Amino acid sequence: MNTMRKPRILLTLLLLLALLIAGVPAARAESFQAVVSVDSMQVYATQSPYQSLGTLPRGTEVTVKAYEGYVALISYGGKKGLAQVSDMTVKSATEAQTAQATQTTPMVATCQTRFYKKADASSSYAAVSEGASVELIAVNGKCAKVNYNGKVGYMLYSHLGEPGTTTQSAADDTPVQTGNAPVAASRNSRVYASASLSGDSVAVGKGTKMTLLAIRGDCAMVEKSGAIGYMPLSHLESASSSAQTASTKANPFPADSNEHTIYAFLIGEMGYNRAAAMGVMANIKYESGYRPVCDGDRGTSYGICQWHAGRKNNLIAYCEENMLDYTTLEGQLRFFKYEITTRYSSVHAYLKSVENTAEGAYDAAYYFCFNFEAPANRTAQSTKRGNYARDTLFPKTK
């Protein structure tokens, strides 16, 4: 193998490696032969700090000892390492099917939940009682593919736990709280593969941003770029504590209203100042009246931002992939963040840069309307929404 410099390893890969080492006992996966199917396959060490061991060229035959998700434990030439499953092809289809059939993990429902027919929260479902046993097949973000009572379907991964450790019992009535909140490490800490906060783990630095999926007692289930792990709840804080505190105190909209939720999201989750948030709010007011269930343009547009045609399809697809309901405010706000930070990053950057003044609110509303919403009569609509943000919305808070 060629010696290479140690690359920068992302938290996603590190968590996957830790999950593989901790979660795949030898009895669960029989060894089988595979061949490298890419020009150059990276191989990593099996122990922290998981440094690169080098590469294997296309056609190299290896033995797959076990695999979980995207990562495989392999042996080659008397050595062991970790590599991506997608970089290899199984030599025997029969062996692949056998290995796939055994690649499940016993889990239990940690709360009353739902078993969906499709990876879509709007699909048909059956109720699942707390403590019910399932077999975990795969995880994709927040969605878990499972075998429940002989049928394959989907559940929220945050509603599953290890048998005997994460289910509630008479001796442990601590509630499992679930959610989807942005958090950050409040100190240098570690993320563990197990909810027991022991065994294999990876280091995370202070300020590392993650998503909080669930809380049980002092243990937090967190997600980073699709990889899931566990860490002490006391080592986490809100990703934008000061902004969220300020938004709670200064939120001018009724507490139980859609407007209140949207404004808090723009301030806390998106990190916009008051002027930028009011600029977006002005547009949502004119687009949908803050109503997530809102059809427009003869059914071709939908939601709080009236996503049109292909963008409407993108909204639905994103929510299906992330086990969200596209008709809800939560699903649409999550898609809003994804879309504006990826496909409309220049608009996002502009909103982050506007001055926190009345004129800044006008500029934010105008720019957002002209470049993100892009309605008919762009200039007239952008001007109208800018005036509304500056003269009506921005004065609501001081």
Image: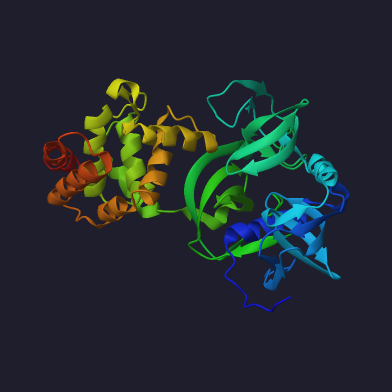
**In the rendered view, does 132 fall on the left or right side of 375?**
right
Residue 29: x and y in percent read 84, 49
Q: Find residue 380 and report its image quarter.
A: top left
Q: How many marks?
A: 0
Q: Residue at x 31, y 45 (%)?
A: 247
Q: Is residue 129 visible?
A: yes
The correct choice, above or below, for 151 with respect to 226 in the image is above
Q: Nearer the viewer, residue 15 or 237?
A: 15
Q: Is residue 41 above or below residue 231?
A: below
**Image spot of residue 195 (x, y percent):** 69, 49
Q: Is residue 191 visible?
A: no
Colour scheme used in the picture? Answer: rainbow
Q: Residue at x 65, y 43 (%)?
A: 139
The x and y percentages for residue 128 are 68, 24
Residues 234 and 71: in front is 71
- Going by the image, does 269 lie left or right of 232? left
Q: Quadrant of residue 191?
A: bottom right
Residue 300 as seen in the image, left or right of residue 30: left
Q: Return the residue nearer the eye: 8 or 246.
A: 8
**Rendered position, 99 above or below 353:** above
Q: Is residue 255 above or below residue 229?
A: above
- Quadrant placement of the N terminus: bottom right
Q: Position of residue 245 (x, y in %)?
A: 35, 48
Residue positioned 34% across, 53% down in the render: 345
